[in-house]
Image: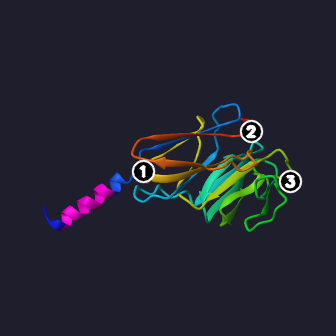
Amino acid sequence: MKRATWLMLACVLQAAAAAAGPLTVEVVDKNGKPTPNAVVLLQVAGLGGQTPPPLPREATVAQERMQFVPAVSLVARGARVRFVNRDPWDHHVRSSAAGAAQFTATGKDAFELRLPGHEEGKPAQAVEVTLDQPGVVGANLLGCYIHGSMRGFIYVSDTPWAAKTGGDGTVRFADVPDGPVQVRVWQAEQLIDLPPQLLQLTRAPAQVRVQLQVVPRRARL
């Protein structure tokens, strides 16, 4: 085997060896029940492994049946988000930073839109915005002046190591570089940031459980 081929094979094996086993993160509420729609982010310090696919740079958030759908969106920094009103009545889209100061802070990505109601037989009207500020956008989070019960959330991530928990409250990351990893969790109703958890990943599968200090309200169906 030629020297160049040996060197290439060695690099491949070294990269493979630097990838840790899969990491599963479980998010539960104050009572220990699985929590969907929580955002899990990894701060990776090691080298090797494979970078995950990039997060979406385009997304659509619909207003339908007096709800924001999806309730939580996870997008990349600089993503274009399209808001569509599919209800027959007018809606606003009002954004502010999520947290204890909901709808009081004004930031780079704060915005207010008004979307007319959808007329039967005609395309639903839409407005697009670009989100450049990492973190959470909109509060209560995306809200509506007209219908105060409506809430939606957008999390803008500047790292591809991010995922949203499913109905079982878990996310799974593959090919994370071995070494130290910091796990952070954001959940819409957890207004006080949870402390990050530090892990030392190896080639063995790893699992971490993060417990919220709140019991999130169930989404309306």
Q: Amino acid at mark 1?
A: Asp
Image quadrant holding the C terminus, namely top right
Q: Camera-side residue: 54 or 70?
A: 54
Q: Residue at x 56, y 57 (%)?
A: 56
Q: Residue 87, image x and y in percent?
A: 76, 47
Q: Earlier in the sequence, mark 2 or mark 1?
A: 1
State how far apart marks 1 and 3 are (Cα).
44 Å
Give left or right: position of 173 versus 11: right
User: Is 13 contained in the magenta span?
Assistant: yes
Q: Camera-side residue: 87 or 103?
A: 103
Q: Earlier in the sequence, mark 3 or mark 2?
A: 3
**Residue range (magenta):** 4-14
Give left or right: position of 67 versus 201: right
State how far apart marks 2 and 1 are (Cα).
31 Å
From the image, tell me which residue sits under label 3.
145
Give left or right: position of 32 versus 43: right
Q: Secondary structure at mark 2?
A: loop
Which numbered circle lies on residue 175? 1
**Dominant secondary structure of the residues highlighted in magenta in the image:** helix
Could you say which quadrant of the image residue 170 lies in? top right
From the image, tell me which residue sits under label 2.
214
Q: Amino acid at mark 2?
A: Val
Q: Earlier in the sequence, mark 1 or mark 3?
A: 3
Could you say which quadrant of the image residue 158 lies in? bottom right
Q: Residue at x 60, y 37 (%)?
A: 169
Q: Camera-side residue: 142 or 125?
A: 142
State how far apart marks 3 and 2 are (Cα).
26 Å
Q: Residues within 10 Å of mark 1 (few under 14, many from 20)?
A: some
Q: Residues within 10 Å of mark 3 (few under 14, many from 20)?
A: few
